């Protein structure tokens, strides 16, 4: 794929504020895999990124032995299937086909509902902002209901849906501020789950400081002229 990439091994192209790229870091760390992390500046995307992901031109991209895998949930599944028992870690996805389908459903729900509403919280004003706030809380309450009394979404084991959602945790402060929310008060079980996940080294290592995320958003809004 090019002389700038090793022929063997793992390379993750990502950007530090990206919840999608954070998923890749958590998954690789959970499996105890050695990899090279390459930071991408999304305002000035590298020729390597554009070559590896010519369709979407986005991070993350996982390169395994010179071959690129794109889209974060697909990357999670690839890592899980390629290294199912790495470092003694359990699989991210359950063995039962129905349970596996449910995990994929909720991960898809997160990216379609939570990401969209969360983005509109800081982009929109007035009625559109109010609608985004309503949709965001409704989506998060559905996820909290799915979690229930379990320690993790898959039960006793940290897995696919946990990785898919906890990657957003560093953005929760930003959602609180821009949405006029108090997620700690409105979603106590989900916030307790976040704290539980952060006790894992893979998660604590991958998640950036929430205040740094908020500063990043302010610079992003300024760049795009969003008041």
Image (tube, rainbow, N blue to C red):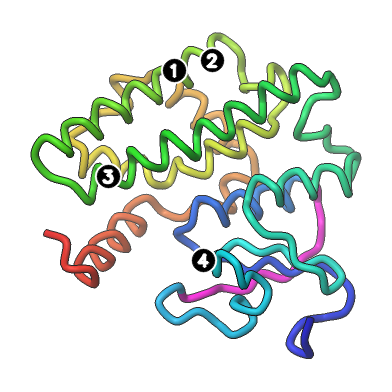
Which residue lies at the image location 12% right of the left edge and 44% below the top edge? 125
- Image quadrant in which you'd find residue 162: top right
Query: Residue placed farthest to the front in the image?
Result: 55
Q: Would you name the residue on which mark 1 appears? A: 142
The correct choice, above or below, for 112 with respect to 43 in the image is above
Secondary structure under the numbered disc 1 in the rendered image = helix
Q: Which mark identifies residue 134?
A: none
- Image quadrant in which you'd find residue 152: top right
Of callouts 4 and 2, the N-terminal one: 4
Which residue lies at the image location 47% right of the left edge and 76% below the top edge? 41
Q: Position of residue 224 (x, y in %)?
A: 23, 68
Q: Would you name the residue on which mark 3 appears? A: 120
Q: Is residue 34 left or right of residue 152?
A: right
Total numbered labels placed on residues in the image:
4
Q: Would you name the residue on which mark 4 appears? A: 15
> Rounded to the nearest whole Å, what is the CA distance between mark 1 and mark 2?
6 Å
> Rounded to the nearest whole Å, what is the CA distance between mark 1 and mark 4?
29 Å
Whether residues under marks 3 and 2 lie with C-beta atoms below 8 angstroms apart, the answer is no
Q: Is residue 157 left or right of residue 166?
A: right
Magenta stretch bounds: 31-41
Whether residues under marks 1 and 4 lie with C-beta atoms below 8 angstroms apart, the answer is no
Whether residues under marks 1 and 2 lie with C-beta atoms below 8 angstroms apart, the answer is yes
Mark 3 or 2: in front is 3
Q: Position of residue 51 (x, y in %)?
A: 65, 79
């Amino acid at each position: 794929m090019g002389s700038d990439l090793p022929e063997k091994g793992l390379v993750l192209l990502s950007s530090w504020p990206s919840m999608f790229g954070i998923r890749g870091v958590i998954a690789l760390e959970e499996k105890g895999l050695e990899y090279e992390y390459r930071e991408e500046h999304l305002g000035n995307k590298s020729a390597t990124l554009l070559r590896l992901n010519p369709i979407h031109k986005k991070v993350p991209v996982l390169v395994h032995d010179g071959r690129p895998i794109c889209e974060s949930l697909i990357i999670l599944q690839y890592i899980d299937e390629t290294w199912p028992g790495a470092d003694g870690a359990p699989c991210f996805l359950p063995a039962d086909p129905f349970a596996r389908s449910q995990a994929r459903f909720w991960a898809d729900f997160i990216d379609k509902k939570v990401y969209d509403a969360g983005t509109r919280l800081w982009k929109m004003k007035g009625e559109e902002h109010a609608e985004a706030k309503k949709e965001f809380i409704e989506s998060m309450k559905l996820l909290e209901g799915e979690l229930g009394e379990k320690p993790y979404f898959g039960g006793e084991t940290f897995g696919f849906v946990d990785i898919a959602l906890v990657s957003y945790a560093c953005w929760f402060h930003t959602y609180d501020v821009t949405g006029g929310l108090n997620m700690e008060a409105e979603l106590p079980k989900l916030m307790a789950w976040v704290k539980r996940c952060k006790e894992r080294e893979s998660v604590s290592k991958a998640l950036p400081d929430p205040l740094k995320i908020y500063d990043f958003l302010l610079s992003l809004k300024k760049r795009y002229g969003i008041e």
